[in-house]
Image (tube, helix red, strand yellow):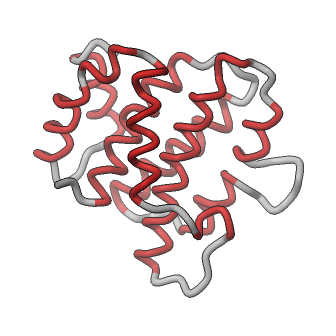
């Protein structure tokens, strides 16, 4: 049984593979959000509010939740879904760790079901993702802390 942190690692590892395949004008914003999520998992040196602001900055102009709606590339729909699942899951973990009394509305309903949806989408995104799922799962469960660099290295070992 995977812990919530291990689930977050698995989702971020696959998010790196998904990110590599995305063609969108919002790549820089995605990269920033992924990097902050990795930073939180590695050292908790980013606040939950800061992580959340990359998803939704409180305006109708910025934030990954807005960008995913504005992206007209149909090939990115499931990719955006999985990125938002992974990043939202990390944000939820951060708020839980901080003992937050209040959660932003989009984060309130984040649960382990989001992990299940993420995994279900992998097959539709790329059959090779599911082929390596057991190996990635084993990698995640053997590590206490995984850095972004280690994750990217493992992705290349798995051919992702």
27 or 14, nearer to the observer: 14
Left or right: where 6 falls relative to 119: left
Left or right: where 52 falls relative to 143: right
Q: Relative to 150, does residue 62 appear above or below in the rendering?
A: below
Q: Relative to 19, does residue 119 appear above or below in the rendering?
A: below
The residue at the far left in this view is 142
Where does residue 49 sit, x and y in percent of width and height?
62, 68
Where does residue 128 sit, x and y in percent of width and height?
33, 14
Where does residue 35 sit, x and y in percent of width and height?
50, 43
How many numbered tags mark residues here?
A: 0
| Quarter the C terminus occupies | top left
Q: Residue, x 46% and y 56% (percent of image)?
A: 90
Left or right: where 155 falls relative to 58: left
Q: Quadrant of residue 134?
A: top left
The residue at the far right in this view is 60
Where does residue 42 sit, x and y in percent of width and height?
33, 54
Q: Relative to 118, does residue 20 appear above or below in the rendering?
A: above
Q: Residue, x 40% and y 65% (percent of image)?
A: 44
Q: Quadrant of residue 64?
A: top right
134 or 154, nearer to the observer: 134
| Quarter the N terminus occupies | bottom left
Q: Residue, x 43% and y 54% (percent of image)?
A: 113
Left or right: where 143 falls relative to 103: left
9 or 47, nearer to the observer: 9
Q: Residue, x 46% and y 42% (percent of image)?
A: 117
Q: Quadrant of residue 126?
A: top left
């Amino acid at each position: 049984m995977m812990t919530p942190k291990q689930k977050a690692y698995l989702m971020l590892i696959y998010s790196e593979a998904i990110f590599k395949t995305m063609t969108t004008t919002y790549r820089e914003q995605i990269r920033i959000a992924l990097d902050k999520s990795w930073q939180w998992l590695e050292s908790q040196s980013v606040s939950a509010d800061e992580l959340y602001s990359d998803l939704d900055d409180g305006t109708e102009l910025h934030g990954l939740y807005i960008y995913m709606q504005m992206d007209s590339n149909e090939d990115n729909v499931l990719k955006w879904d999985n990125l938002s699942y992974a990043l939202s899951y990390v944000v939820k973990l951060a708020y839980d760790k901080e003992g937050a009394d209040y959660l932003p509305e989009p984060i309130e309903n984040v649960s382990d079901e989001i992990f299940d949806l993420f995994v279900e989408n992998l097959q539709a995104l790329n059959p090779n993702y599911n082929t390596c799922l057991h190996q990635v799962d084993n990698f995640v469960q053997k590590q206490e802390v995984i850095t972004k660099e280690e994750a990217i290295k493992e992705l290349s070992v798995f051919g992702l």
